[in-house]
Image (tube, coloured by chain):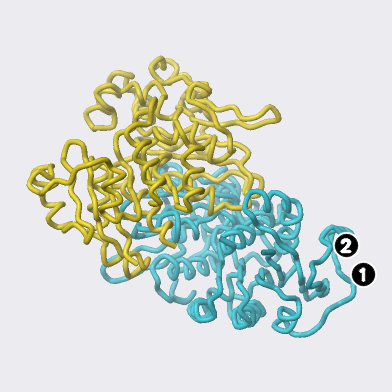
Chain colours: A cyan, B yellow
Amino acid sequence: MKHKIALAGCGNVGTALLEILHEKKKELKDKYAFEYEVVLIRDLMKGTIMNDLGLDMGTVLGELHERNSFGAFEQASGPLGELLKRSGATVLAECTPTNLKTGEPGLSHIRDALAAGINVTTTNKGPLAVAFDELTAAAERNGVKFLYEGVVMSGTPIIDMVKNGMAGCSVLGVEGILNGTTNFILTKMTDGATYHEALAEATELGYAEADPSGDVEGWDAAVKVVILAKILFGQSIQVKDVARLGITQITPQQIASASKNGNVMKLIAGIDFDTFGIHPYVMPREIEASHPLAQVGGAVNAITVKTDNLGEVTLTGPGAGRRETGQALLSDMIRMSR
Amino acid sequence: MKHKIALAGCGNVGTALLEILHEKKKELKDKYAFEYEVVLIRDLMKGTIMNDLGLDMGTVLGELHERNSFGAFEQASGPLGELLKRSGATVLAECTPTNLKTGEPGLSHIRDALAAGINVTTTNKGPLAVAFDELTAAAERNGVKFLYEGVVMSGTPIIDMVKNGMAGCSVLGVEGILNGTTNFILTKMTDGATYHEALAEATELGYAEADPSGDVEGWDAAVKVVILAKILFGQSIQVKDVARLGITQITPQQIASASKNGNVMKLIAGIDFDTFGIHPYVMPREIEASHPLAQVGGAVNAITVKTDNLGEVTLTGPGAGRRETGQALLSDMIRMSR
């Protein structure tokens, strides 16, 4: 049975997914019995193309690499829900830009796909932060799969690990470095740079955006904490419930003082759990050199999960690059297919 | 549908599994829709008890804790294959002692269970080191599940992570600290102890056995490399194919020299992969302080997997204790039930 893949959003992540799928077409069939066609690609800027028998991915990728547009092809038009039906899609990969307040347009895309009985994989944090319960209930009601490995730690499979790898373990708390940009900056500051020097380098390397506040004020990490609170503890909270402080006020003196104490300054995203409930936070913290997260440097992510049966388990992986996030979508699709 | 669990081998690991199952009975039902009865427990020393309607686990655990024996109960007898049929078991948890040469008695237990159409989970390295291909083929032929999360890194789910969490990624190499005993010893030596002082402390703490050679000569790690070679690279090798050197010849001078170079001495179990094929090894190596495994100290395990889509991913967890290994069996059973 061939999977018919629809892609909403063909930016860096969407393009990376298409590249990986194309590159690995034979391997996916041989190793995972995963056969597919891409039947729909919808992008606000690049255009919308559809072929219910399967788009010619060699040609599509050629156009993407040459002109970064689908303008050379005949366009399909209409609302996504309608296009999904006409294309015969069996799975939607939703990777439109994240809007943390409204979740749109991703939220509507996912609602439409689930309502149409189409499986969904997404790396888009907005819809999950805003409507997790509604979407998971809709998936269950319609008997379809809804996976979102990429929303925390990108393709490094922390979500699958907690839900499946560690099935039977109870989670007692979690601490993570969930934003690669701020970890890069703090690593550079630990090596002697000022905040502004480190931010400038992060921007140059593409780790920080023109407006870096989403990262440096801890918003990105806070959204991930909201999602983890749901996945790990079953609790529905909002970003405003996360005690949040970013890294913009950290001084070189604080960094030097931490080093002198044998500690490391990190922006920790975590959830403590006690008899009063969960305590979600994103805070700069001076952690001991022996802490599992202390040596995690650069634009990477790491998470330490505290459990009953396994004590502390730590997973470290790359930051959210294009290929890593394409991998998250691919692994979701393979898992759905089993 | 209630899972009917048979346990072969009721030593530390088997007992831990029974304790976790009993403790979490309600949670397993509520959280994982996993309902069970224990229908058969077979232990060479303690005795064999069976009840196709389900043993009274409160009473069984009481006897285990008080007398460490099932002598007070009516005994069941016969070959395991026959007992499995009479008990109506749907899954066998195989945790008899490991024999790395013959794989017995675990190998026969697993063969009998798979042939009888019973799912199998095991933490027993011997059968996998000796007959991996035969057993996985038998499972497939009989349409049953055969899982073995606990054989590498105990309950820390590296096997599930590579097979499922990272589905779609290609593995390009692996390096690990797969034996907690030797890592404990080397950590103590890095802190100034001699090899013999560190070994004595390891023995006292129960990390090392009376005859520690399985750990300190690298045999335990080498068997895990054999299993990883199969799981990660699909290659069937034997323990003798692993270039193996233990830690018995490491001197305090070498340790001190490593520290002076800013490096750490670790017993690394790994598989390199190039155009000539795979290169499996267990070797003491001086690794840089920035290496993901350098700061992993004590009786713990860690593994760094090098991949195409995710670069390096590192998973760190506790060493193979009783509860951790019970967790491996439990998570396998939950995964089988889905």
Say whether disc 2 or disc 1 marks the residue closer to the N-terminus: 2
Relative to B295, A200 lies left or right: right
Identify which amino acid the numbered label 1 is placed on.
Ala
Relative to B247, A33 lies left or right: right
Q: Residue A72 carries which label?
A: 1
- Marks 2 and 1 in Cβ contact (< 8 Å): yes
Q: How many labels does the image show?
A: 2
Q: Residue at 63% x, 62% y: name it.
A: A329
Image quarter for residue A191? Answer: top right
Identify which amino acid the numbered label 2 is placed on.
Glu
Is B263 above or below relative to B8? above
- Front-lying residue, A289 or A31: A31
Task: Please rate how many residues cluster around mark 2, counting C-alpha atoms within 10 Å: few if below 14, some from 14 to 19, many from 20.
Answer: some
Q: Position of residue A188 (x, y in %)?
A: 59, 47
Q: Residue at 46% x, 40% y: name it.
A: B135
Q: Mark 2 points at which residue?
A: A63
